[in-house]
Structure formats: structure tokens, C-alpha cells
Image (cartoon, rainbow, N blue to C red):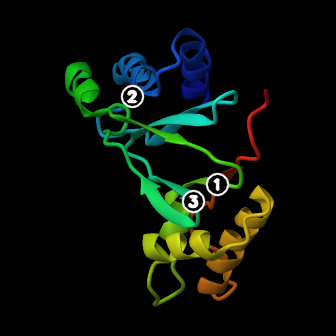
Amino acid sequence: MAEMKGIFQSLSRIDHSPSRVLGSAHEALVGTIDKHSFISLIYGVLDLRTGTMTVARAGHCPMLFRSGGKTRYIKPTGLGLGMGTNAFFRKTIAEETIRFSPGDCAVFYTDGVTEARPKDGEEFGYEKLEAVVQSADVTSALGMRDAIVMAVDRHMQHEPPEDDLTLVVIRWTGSTT
């Protein structure tokens, strides 16, 4: 992770296109990562002046976007970093651009959220996550985060999950200009 952090800190200053940054990160990593391993991630660039976010995904969970009372997954294509040749990897990476309106939310999460499963039970899943995001109070990013964490906790019957649960919620309040 320290290597990835350094790669992204360098590349994000040079290029603002998420797909090109992922392609360059893949090139930097492919020679050093174990050939049986890969890194999944989702990378977005938010323009604070216009409220647009461009997102690219490298084999990671799709982003959830709630806008105008509707919730949908943002899932541009892309392989995990370290998979395939540089040329093939670059062909798989796509970007999607969304525009925020005041009150809209974007939810980034790890598979520990969707794969949370109580003993002898079903996974929390993508449909349940989408339903929570759709019905949650969106007056704050913290409120959205708490609604998701509490729903997963109830699903897990208050038992600790086996995997990490990582959430990042962005709630747009308007442009900074």
C-alpha cells in the first residue's frame, strides 16, 4: 500500500484523467507485483468548481450515486492493477463522468460491506446496499455513512465482520465558487 500511495501521489499531480492515471499506475506496478496478485481500486477526480466527478475503476466495487431521489451504480469497466499487459490493461479501463447537484451523494466502499455475512447467512449484497443508500436520510455524509454501517451491523446480527468495512461518502452541497 505504501508503494501504491507513492505512485498515486506522483501520478495524480501529472495527469487529471483517472483512466490514464490507472494505466500509468499499472505500468509502474506490473513489474513489481507478484504475478498471482492484483490491486483493486476506484479512482475519481472531483472538480469543485463544476460539481463533476470523473471515475475509473480497476476491478473494484462500483460506486453508488444518489441523485434526484434515484440511486444507481457507477461501474466503468477495468481490470485490477497488475493484471494483463500494459496495452490490454489500458484497453479495459473506461471512465464515467457524473454531475452532482446539491444534496447528491457518492458512496465508495470495499467488498467487506457487500460480502458481510452472518454465520450461516447470506451476504449483505449489492441490492441491500443500494436500498439502504436509496432510503437513507441524506442531510449529511455522516448520516449516510451511519445508515450503511448500522444496516450492515443489523444484518451481521451485531457480530463483528470477518473483513474490513471501509466507506467514503461524499455529499455535494454546491460549488465552491
* Residue occupied by mark 2: 33
Q: Position of residue 112 (x, y in %)?
A: 54, 63
**Residues at marks 2 and 3, CA–CA distance in whole angstroms:** 35 Å
**Residue at 35 percent of width and 32 percent of height:** 34
**Which SS class for mark 1?**
strand
**Residue at 34 percent of width and 23 percent of height:** 30
Q: Is label 3 in contact with label 1 (beta carbons under 8 Å)?
A: yes
Q: Position of residue 53 (x, y in %)?
A: 55, 36
Callout 3: 10 Å neighbours few (<14), some, many (20+)? many
Q: Position of residue 62 (x, y in %)?
A: 44, 52
Amino acid identity at mark 2: Ile
Q: Residue 141 is drawn in which quadrant? A: bottom right
Decide if residue 165 is in sight here. Answer: yes
Is residue 80 or residue 67 the one in the foreground? 67
**Residues at marks 1 and 2, CA–CA distance in whole angstroms:** 34 Å
Is residue 1 or residue 79 the one in the foreground? 79
Residue farthest to the top? 14
